[in-house]
Amino acid sequence: MQPERAIIGKILQIYRYFLYFCKLVNKQQEKAEEEKGLTAHICLNSFNSLTPLIPISYIE
């Protein structure tokens, strides 16, 4: 194999690893955003369920 082809092959291999790494990072980011949204949703539902229990005189 010619040295140029070997170098190009290594560059392509590194590029494929880089793309794979980017996909993993994107998946982790999406998962974190999904969990963050789920947490916010749970907190909002908890707050909404507690709100009617608080007498209005305490709120004002």
Image (cartoon, helix red, strand yellow):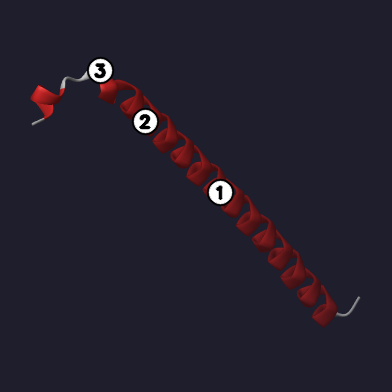
**Quarter-wise, where is residue 2 in the image?**
bottom right
Q: Secondary structure at mark 2?
A: helix
Question: Tag 3, which secondary structure?
Answer: helix
Residue 1 spot, x, y in % from top left: 91, 75
Near-viewer residue (31 or 53): 53
Viewer-proximal residue among 50 and 26: 50
Q: Is residue 7 left or right of residue 47?
A: right
Give the mark, 3 or 2, whose residue is nearer the N terminus.
2
Q: In the current view of this chain or complex, which residue is farthest to the right?
A: 1
Q: Residue at x 20, y 20 (%)?
A: 54
Q: Are marks 3 and 1 in contact (CB under 8 Å)?
A: no
The label number, if any, that marks residue 30 in the structure image: 1
Mark closest to the chain's N terminus, 1 or 2: 1
Amino acid type, residue under disc 3 in the picture: Leu
Give me the C-alpha separation between circle 3 and circle 2: 16 Å
Q: Pointers 1 and 2 in contact (CB under 8 A)?
A: no
The residue indicated by pointer 3 is 53
